[in-house]
Amino acid sequence: MPLPEESLGVPAPVLDRLGAAGYRAMIAGVRLGVFTALESGPLSVEELATTIDGDPAGVRSLVNVLVTFGYLRYDEHGVTTAAAPGPVDAELFWHEVLFEHWADIEDTIRTGTPRRGFYTWLSERPASGARLRRMLAGAAVDLADDIAAALPPAATVLDIGGGHGDHAVELCRRRPDVRVTVFDLPETITALREDAPQDRVTARAGDYLTDDLGAGHDLVLLFNVLHGHRPEECRELFQRAAKSLSPTGSIAILDHDREPPAGLGPAAAGYLSMFDLTLWQGHAGGVHRYTDLAAWLGEAGLTETRVVPLAASPLEKLLIAGRPS
């Protein structure tokens, strides 16, 4: 929550430093339980310190920072919440990504090769992995109605890189006509969701960049997959996925668009830039332009494309592509 430059009369780098301090203080507040403690109403600094088992002087100093950055405020009753942070899982996860996973980002930028891939880094941090799992499952629920309504009719669906089956499960709940095969790495497929309907969701272990994708699929899903790959890999994957389709089949992509919709403001561009650099650090991948994705799909013979905005996530879109009728 950086402070506006005109209000301080200081150079932008100092503002960035202040913004980082405000963000770090907010994370401290989350970890210490400050915001949870204030959910039931205002507390004095001394009462808050007792509630979170903190030193009163240290708590007061933290509260003052959080007041400065607009998270808390003082009123006649004590300290109260002014603007709560986002979901706890998201805030803690992104803090770990930015301050731990980015620790050697200079090396990745110089060499183009991550020292540790994102999933290797994540495997070393079970708590972070659990947070990400909950975030992804929640996002699948939030988007499920719009996705199910937008996808074309399909009996057989191949969910490439479908992870633990979040989107597959939600699609089956809304579309009784579909059966989904989730195709992902063995270590991921073994953790397919327990509530996945066994008669309609099956798992197949393999490397979707090299292994046979099968044939005759009515629909291939590439949901939050392409941003982990460079353009040449995406183009090759489109060629292979297109060959796995039935004559009337389609590919559906869910991802961020590097060109955000007009009117979302600078925060949208800032988020996409942060996400893009995170993908580079974790996979040497990045956020692609949907115009590029459509062109690469066209190279694979899928020239009939349409883009579907998603109200629950304005920075993400569906891109659905098929062969000319």
Image (cartoon, rainbow, N blue to C red):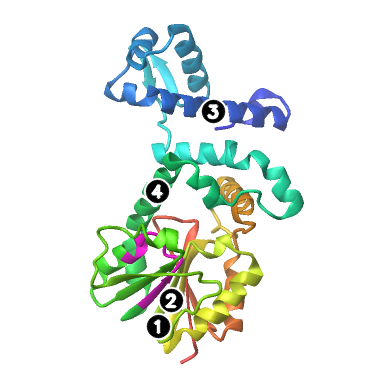
**Quarter of the image holding residue 8?**
top right
Is 114 part of what is drawn in magenta?
no
Mark 1: which secondary structure?
strand
The disc at residue 135 is 4
Q: Which residue is identified by label 3?
A: 24
Q: Quadrant of the N terminus?
A: top right
Q: Earlier in the sequence, mark 3 or mark 1?
A: 3
Q: Residue furthest right?
A: 110
Mark 2: which secondary structure?
strand
Residue 16 rendering spot, x and y as whole percentages: 65, 32
* Mark 4 crowdedness (10 Å alpha carbons): few <14, some 14-19, many ≥20: some
Alpha carbon of mark 4 to alpha carbon of mark 2: how far?
23 Å
Q: Amino acid at mark 3?
A: Arg
Alpha carbon of mark 3 to alpha carbon of mark 1: how far?
47 Å
Q: Earlier in the sequence, mark 4 or mark 2?
A: 4
Q: Which residue is identified by label 1?
A: 217
Tell me whether circle 1 and circle 4 mark residues in contact (CB < 8 Å).
no
Alpha carbon of mark 2 to alpha carbon of mark 3: how far?
41 Å
